[in-house]
Amino acid sequence: MNRSDAAPVAGCHFRVEIVDGNGHAVELGCAEVVFPALSVHAESQSPHAEEQLVLRRACGTDRLLHDWWAKACRGRAPLRRSVRVTLLAPDQARAVQRWRFRNARPASLLYSPLNALSASVAMESLAIAFDSVEIETGEAAA
């Protein structure tokens, strides 16, 4: 490892994608990703049910997260998907680290408060349950 590989990387350059069973990926344009605690469990490497990935993005006309959640509420969600979060190098040309959350499904949907006295952006947050996570670093993440 050379010295430049050991430098810390800012967490502001990243990409979030939902990948369907056919390998088709859709980028979400998230503003924030909140990772769950990835604990080691005696039974398996799977997370406890309460450990969830949270994706936040500005509200807009794209209904992808809402529609996925709504179908799950009706018991008609598509086959479980993967969520891929990729941390990018400062030049945004290469992946530094990648997390793959397997068998991802919506757990809850939350919208930020609406406030007529503030000009803040309305946000939507989707909490996602998952069965396992795979973490790749360096060249394996590329």
Image (tube, rainbow, N blue to C red):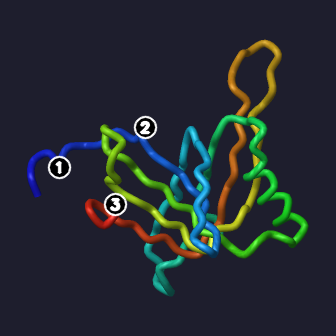
Of circles 1 and 3, which is in front?
A: 3
Query: Is tag 1's residue or tag 2's residue first in the polypeptide sequence?
Result: 1
Mark 1 burial class by Cα count in 10 Å: few <14, some 14-19, many 20+: few
Which residue is located at x 78 percent, y 47 percent? 63
Mark 2 burial class by Cα count in 10 Å: few <14, some 14-19, many 20+: few
| Element class at badge 1 | helix
Query: Is tag 3's residue or tag 2's residue first in the polypeptide sequence?
Result: 2
Farthest bottom residue in view: 43
Which residue is located at x 56 percent, y 56 percent? 17
Query: Is tag 1's residue or tag 3's residue first in the polypeptide sequence?
Result: 1
Q: Please, what is the three-letter code of the amino acid marked with disc 3?
A: Ala
In the depicted structure, whether residue 113 falls above or below residue 138: above
Q: Return the residue at label 3.
A: 142
| Element class at badge 2 | loop
Which residue is located at x 39 percent, y 67 percent? 135
Q: Going by the image, does 95 lie left or right of 24?
A: left
Which mark, residue 12? Answer: 2
Task: Examine the image and state in which quarter residue 68 appears.
Answer: bottom right
Farthest right residue in view: 74
Q: Going by the image, does 114 lie left or right of 4?
A: right
Q: Return the residue at label 1.
A: 6
Q: How many marks?
A: 3
Asked if disc 1 and disc 2 are in contact, CB closer than 8 Å, the reply is no
> Where does residue 125 sit, x and y in percent of width and height?
69, 45
Q: Going by the image, does 80 lie left or right of 38?
A: right
Which residue is located at x 33 percent, y 45 percent? 93
Residue at mark 1 to residue at mark 3: CA–CA distance: 17 Å
Residue at mark 3 to residue at mark 2: CA–CA distance: 18 Å
Q: Please, what is the three-letter code of the amino acid marked with disc 2?
A: Cys
